Image (cartoon, rainbow, N blue to C red):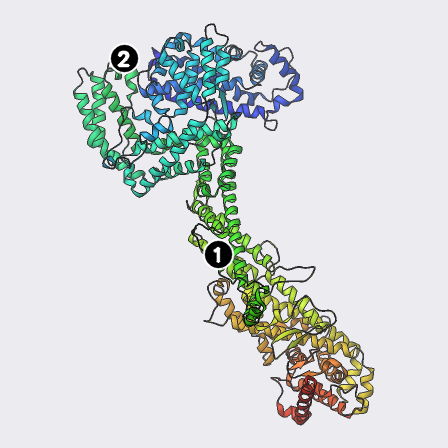
Amino acid sequence: KSLSQKLAEKFTILNDRGIGMLTRIYNIKKACGDPKAKPSYLIDKNLESAVKFIVRKFPAVETRNNNVSLSFAYILHIYYILFKLILILFPYLFLQTVNFDLTKNYLDLVVTYTNLMMLLSRIEERKAIIGLYNYAHEMTHGSSDREYPRLGQMIVDYENPLKKMMEEFVPHGKSLSDALLSLQMVYPRRNLSADQWRNAQLLSLISAPSTMLNPAQSDTMPCEYLSLDAMEKWIVFGFILCHGVLNSDQAALSLWKLALQSSTCLCLFRDEVFHIHKSAEDLFINIRGYNKRVNDIKECKEQALGLMHRERRKFLRSALKELATVLSDQPGLLGPKALFVFMALSFARDEIIWLLRHADNIQKKSTDDFIDKHIAELIFYMEELRAHVRKYGPVMQRYYVQYLSGFDAVVLNELVQNLSVCPEDESIIMSSFVNTMTSLSVKQGIQPNTAYTSVSKASLGIADHRELGKMMNTIIFHTKMVDSLVEMLVETSDLSIFCFYSRAFEKMFQQCLELPSQSRHSISFPLLCTHFMSCTHELCPEERHHIGDRSLSLCNMFLDEMAKQARNLITDICTEQCTLSDQLLPKHCAKTISQAVNKKSKKQMGKKGEPEREKPGVESMRKNRLLVTNLDKLHTALSELCFSINYVPNMVIWEHTFTPREYLTSHLEIRFTKSIVGMTMYNQATQEIAKPSELLTSVRAYMTVLQSIENYVQIDITRVFNNVLLQQTQHLDSHGEPTITSLYTNWYLETLLRQVSNGHIAYFPAMKAFVNLPTENELTFNAEEYSDISEMRSLSELLGPYGMKFLSESLMWHISSQVAELKKLVVDNVEILTQMRTSFDKPEHMASLFKKLSSVDSVLKRMTIIGVILSFRSLAQEALRDVCRPFNFPPLEWHHILTQYTIMQFFLASGSSFLDNIQNGSPDGVNGHFLFLVTENISPEEEYKIACLLMVFVAVSMPTLASNVMSQYSPAIQGHCNNIHCLAKAINQIAAALFTIHKGSIEDRLKEFLALASSSLLKIGQETDKTTTRNRESVYLLLDMESPFLTMDLLESCFPYVLLRNAYHAVYKQSVSSSA
């Protein structure tokens, strides 16, 4: 009698504690079965003999050997207390139940107890754990634990738990069988085939439009969304425990056989399963008179195929899709049709769990029945329905508050008033229900409990008043819609079991990504990770971290794989678009033009001519809509996957927030960075690199594709451009990898300009480009195709102001190394140059001193190299000014220039105007840029003297250029093939820099240079050796240099302009005769 008091509360508490104990037993089993996690006292060599002795003598107590350390006693205490708790459950398994809630809780408790004992029997170390604890207890307290005899005997008795429980349940078979037989109307109705569901238009809101707004009703509301998996466990385990009724009751036998045909294994707990047919057959085969039952089991085993479940999943996919679509358009229907939503969730959840369990545990005969590549779609629609319930929960609450107060309260009041007999206590409770529901508001909650009618003292029985019972069940469902929506979602759609099937979970995800039509549902897998924490229990708090970490790692892995897949698709599309853009490059039109010009002659040649080349754009011409190109397939696959990535803005898992779009953004940044560098096609071995204009075309095509991604996913592609392109303007990116800035800077310095120094390339001022010279060893590249104004502008667009600044600084570093070498040459000839500086009006003395000079050719060559570098720098700065001209920016793609507008202004005002400062003789901005020209450990006076003598050295060395064959001036290119026309730029800018740093007069020093140079060049005219004077006129023209520091009057006083005019006439005349 005492056990029957507050039975509902006890069942609720015991079921909760039973789940908690199952959780701990499960963790003990996993820990003992894992060599890495196994308790130390079970693998301690010092305890090995003691453990074997205890297990052999179990449950007898033997403490003669007391040389064992008891440091493990505390850990064992936790396990031992858990085993003792199992004893508490047993007395509550044999109570009479009369209504839905109590029957459900009772059957749950029976199954929980059964699962607990079966799981306990699977822990091989259970005897060692219990025996060791009792040994430690006796050594510590001097006596065995009080409960140890019962517990030890239970462990021994339950070696075969089902067999023992079958014996114990014999006296209580009537109460258990009655509870199970109450399922004879519910279970067959839930276990229908897909065709029967389809014929009944199950879960369809639009099959009967006229009744769409009518509330979904049922006499057994809680049974409609009751888990099929739970019912099968009740039936299978229940009838095993009270198996006698199978021989006496046909209804029981029908339920039993139907359950055996539905599944081949049941879930004990998480990923621990119970193989139904084999276990039942082993139990029944030794019972006399059960041959027929054994045959039934074998027959059902053959019929237990996955075809029915496969068809159910197929039906549920379409049914849930329809339901989710209608509810997303009309969320107000969530009120009257809430029952349909939870039925759909429960049905789908049962089928998904069935597939997961069987796919992992059954030796498959028909793989098609246990592999479902469309499972992600079903999970996705479940998540969509769950999202609708969470989003529109207030709508449902308002609906059912009005329903409870306006309808349920009235009907309940009428039923109570019409009761023939209603005791005073029950009348007070019912009146309280009615009054509470009548005055209900959304902020209030109500949970009427009909369990009081099961107490033995209650005179008002639900079984005698069925209409009242039905109404109370309906009211309970309606109150759950007000108070317990989250709990209802967990009850009907929790899929946290995936946490314990990681391998199958990941395999399903990979199958989903591999199938383009299913990739749009791939977000369902990360969303499932939000379920995992619901499987934790307060009795086992230590596993929260483990499960939480697993949920985080799986979600991170899924989102990362989705982003990678999208990135790969985008990369393939970009590759296709870059190929199409490449077809539009000017270099490909030559053949087309040639064909057009020679079209008539080719016609005369007849059919032997070459086939006409396809023009760009042919790929867009479709004769048939059914023709699908590779690009079409890629776009389709990308749109499907992006739908999934864009489905939710973020998801919260274990207090961590995941944003799927950020994964894609991150991967796009990394891939875009690698692609830009890869498209340069830089080959360090052969020193080959893509033309800047071609790279720019490819980058623009790539960026056009990336911009189109915003049509699929709500990401800020501008941020991607800014992050990537700004990094490419630096020497190294954020990962320390080379950028296009470093690659092109290195190529122009080490390849193009080095070949200029070697005499294979010349700078043509007329063309504003570097051009290959005819040599024996042809270069592998055409310098003009990398240095003309269009290519330099493309380079400026690619590198931006920052990148061009780095290029400029690298050029200056090379100039500084040449100036350092020039200073060394000056120091070697300092005495001679000092005398020559003051003897320019003494021709004979100058001639004798000049013969004593060393490294004359080296000085001129190094000054020429400086001039070439400065000429290249001028081209780069001019291109940068054209590209970055204020208020005339390039199109939208160059965000890294747009967003750095103020930096660009500063650069144009200071950095890029550095050239102007030098040419104009302005000291502003020069000191900082040319500090490298100062040599350490030398006094300023000595530095100044060396600078002056450097100008002298260059001036007196210029006449030697006349003997060089390559010094001939070409009017066509407005320069010399050996680049000596660059000397003027080198002299002007080096002089400006040196004498600005040393605070000397630039004009005076250049006057001195002009005087020495003109004096030296005029002496050439007096030479009679034709070899020495072969290019005299061409060298004269070097003095016709534009300088911001010298005037034409000064030049006239030193070197008559008539000589320059005659020199121009001579070189032009020579050029005409040469060409003729």
- Expressed as whole percent of the image width and height from the top left, the position of residue 723 reads 52, 57
Q: Which mark is residue 71?
A: none
Please provide percent x and percent y for residue 184. 34, 18
Upstream in the sequence, badge 2 or badge 1? 2
Taking the spot 59% from the left edge, 22% from the top edge, the residue there is 72
Where is mark 2, residue-wise?
457
The mark closer to the camera, 2 or 1, is 1
* Residue depicted at x 45% and y 71%: 887
Binning the other alpha carbons within 10 Å of mark 2 as few (below 14), some (14 to 19) or many (20 upward) gives few
Nearer the observer, 518 or 822: 518
Measured Cα–Cα span from mark 2 to mark 1: 77 Å
Q: Which residue is painted at 46% across and 38% down in the image?
A: 525
Q: Locate the C terminus by quadrant.
A: bottom right
Q: Is residue 466 left or right of residue 602?
A: left
In the rendered view, tell whether residue 147 sits above or below residue 796: above
Up the image or down, 440 lies above or below 146; here it is: below
Mark 1 = which residue? 705
The percent coordinates of residue 449 (x first, y second) are 29, 23
User: Which quadrant is the N terminus positioned in?
Assistant: top left
Which amino acid type is marked by label 2?
Answer: Lys
Quarter assignment of residue 307:
top left
